[in-house]
Image: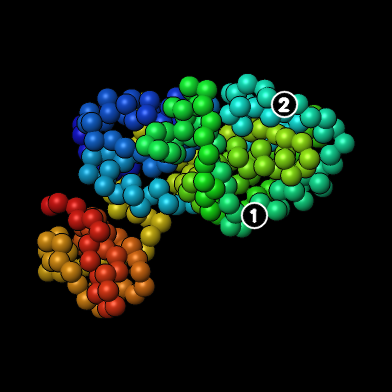
Amino acid sequence: MSPSDGVAVIDKEAGWTSHDVVAKARGVFGTRKVGHAGTLDPDATGVLVLGVGRATRLLRFLTPLTKQYVGELVLGVETTTLDASGDVTAVHDMSRVAPREVAQAASGFVGQIMQVPPMVSAVRVGGRRLHELARQGLEVEREAREVSVYELAVAPVDAASGVYRIEVSCSSGTYIRSLAADIGSALGGGGHLRALRRVAIGSFSVEQARPVTAPELLSMADALRDYSSVSVGEALGRRVGDGQVLAAGELAVAGDGPWAVLGPQGQLLAVYEAHRPGVVKPAVVIPR
């Protein structure tokens, strides 16, 4: 496959790091210009959106999109990593916890919540990533961060064994294994996450995802499909391509953006955003 520009929706396998997928994709696409929008843990599977070529400049707009996950909450067992890959640190008898109690506890984590990043995460503290410190057996203070959980549903898979299916729609930066552990704690015991699968990033769903060995490259215009777009003619398109600051009325846009600006053939010319009242500026210009 020759070098090109666009995005690929990959169905990441378990056991691969996000960096592993990027490294493989560089060979598949024949270019080193490959990046991803949103890390997935090695044990997790599902949607990983890659930017290829000039589309790597668009990943900043994909990272904030809403994420959707499915997985299993296992009550009664706490682990060092908050998921099934860690060592067991505590066991609780939660056999009397009823499904309605689990659903009620989970409902308390819907909305804007404060969440402490797990030690096995890529968050930096003091210039070092937490997972690097965790591998050295260290644990440090982490500041809680505000995240948004839009929807959270739990349903028993094997209630007698404390296993529940968990479905989450949330903002970028939300840790699903932290949610699982926090739900277990809220029920008076503990818990961990297993079998995590990301089923969507914005409108990029697992149904259209492909293996990294056989990816489908979508256009750069399609990369911005979750945002509003405007089409311009050749004359205005040249000004957009030159990165000019424009009156909002020239693009017929209002609000803060961002907006994908498309040329006469539907090609992505630039991404614009609000600059000051009535004026917009380019956030990214795609070189002609």
Percent from the top left, x then y, of residue 73?
69, 36
Q: Residue, x 48% and y 48% (percent of image)?
A: 172
Depicted 234 relative to depicted 161: above or below: below
Depicted 45 relative to depicted 55: above or below: above
Depicted 43 relative to depicted 235: above or below: above
Q: CA distance from mark 1 to mark 2?
A: 26 Å
Q: Nearer the viewer, mark 1 or mark 2?
A: 2
State yes or no: discs 1 and 2 in contact (Cβ < 8 Å). Answer: no
Q: Quadrant of the N terminus?
A: top left
State the mark number for residue 110. 1
Q: Secondary structure at mark 2?
A: strand
User: With 286 as the anchor, is 151 left or right in this view?
Assistant: right
User: With 199 as the anchor, is 53 left or right in this view?
Assistant: left
Q: Residue, x 35% and y 66% (percent of image)?
A: 257
Percent from the top left, x then y, of residue 146?
53, 53
Residue situated in front as seen by the camera: 244 or 204: 244
Q: Secondary structure at mark 1?
A: loop
Q: Look at label 1 and name its amino acid.
A: Val
The number of callouts visible is: 2
Earlier residue among tags 1 and 2: 2
Identify the image's colour scheme: rainbow, by chain, secondary structure or one colour: rainbow
Tell me which corner region of the image, top left, top right, bottom left or bottom right, holds residue 266.
bottom left
Residue situated in front as seen by the camera: 185 or 104: 185
- Disc 2: CA contacts within 10 A as few (<14), some (14-19) or many (>=20): few
Q: Which residue is mark 2?
A: 90
Percent from the top left, x then y, of residue 244?
15, 66
Q: Residue, x 65% and y 39% (percent of image)?
A: 180
User: With 186 as the anchor, is 79 left or right in this view?
Assistant: left
Q: Look at label 2 and name its amino acid.
A: Ala
Residue 133 can be seen, yes or no? yes
Residue 195 can be seen, yes or no? no
